[in-house]
Image (cartoon, rainbow, N blue to C red):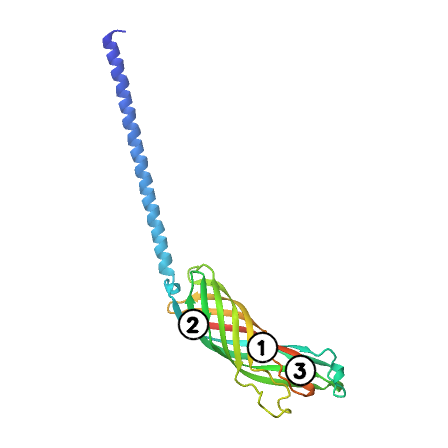
Amino acid sequence: MNCSNKIIVFSLANLSLNVFQKYFYTRLICLLSLLLIISIQADAQVRQRRQKRIAAENMPKYDRRLFHFGINLGMNLNWLAIRPIADLRSLSPDTIYSVNYLIQPGFTMGIESNLRLSNHFDLRFTPSLTLGTKSIVYQRPKGVVNQLDIESTLLEFPLYIKFKSVRLTNWRAYVIGGGKYTYDLSNKIKAEDASEYPVKLRPHDVTAELGFGMDFYLPYFKFSTQVKASFGFLDLKHPENNIFNNAIDRMNSRSVFIQFLFE
């Protein structure tokens, strides 16, 4: 092959390489441009969805507040966990066959105060006023039934830890747990008429409480529903020397609350 033919072959090879390089770079630029357009479009869609989600959330900054307050209203079911003495027949001649409780409804209302601890934990203090009745039923000979109703007006000072789930648009679930001190304003400790008040309850009590609920974020406030149970630690029996009181060894308070919160 002479020199001129070599030059022609080299030129053709160089031309083919240049054409391939131009084709490759053109395709690469087109591909990168397409990927860039897709990524921009995807980012725009993500931003749009996020903005729609934020726009759909009521009070999106509500849970960032350090403090917030509200009120609660609800009903309660309360009773006494009664432990009778080992041998009720020992009370002869005034024998009592059994001592039981009745579950009675009541009403509760209070003030909600909430301190934000973290994204999922709050500290809550909810002083409340609870109205109710505690009933004791005595089964006696010849089918005689005696029922004692003890009215109570309780000042309650509960302190809770609230654990919240992740917020899903406008609602979230939570659980609460803590303790409560109560004082019975209507206690009859100083009453001297034993026939009218044969069984008296001590005014002070300490309880453990556990519950769960749902928060609903409305346009102008947060509405919550809550159910909780209360278990008293202290023996409420006050010493009185009569057959009804002597039949009881120990009494502890029990309650279930169904509440509606407006915050």
Q: Residue furthest front?
A: 239
Which residue sits at x=48%, y=71%?
A: 159
* Residue 28 percent coordinates (x, y): 31, 32
Mark 1–mark 3 Cα distance, whole angstroms, equals 15 Å
Task: Kindly state the secondary structure of the residue where label 3 is placed.
Answer: strand
Observer-side mark, 1 or 2, equals 2
Q: Badge 1, how many Cα within 10 Å: few under 14, some, many 20+?
A: many
| Residue 178, position as x, y percentages in the image | 52, 69
- Relative to residue 124, is residue 78 drawn left or right? right
Per the rendering, the mark at residue 78 is 1
Q: Which quadrant of the figure contains the N terminus?
A: top left
Q: What's the distance in space between the residues labelled 1 and 2, CA to CA? A: 25 Å
Q: Secondary structure at mark 2?
A: strand
Q: Quick one: which residue is furthest to the left in this view? A: 4
On the image, numbered disc 2 is attached to which residue? 113
Asked if residue 263 is positioned above or below residue 237 in the image, the reply reads: above
- Mark 1–mark 2 contact, CB under 8 Å? no
Disc 3, disc 2: CB below 8 Å? no
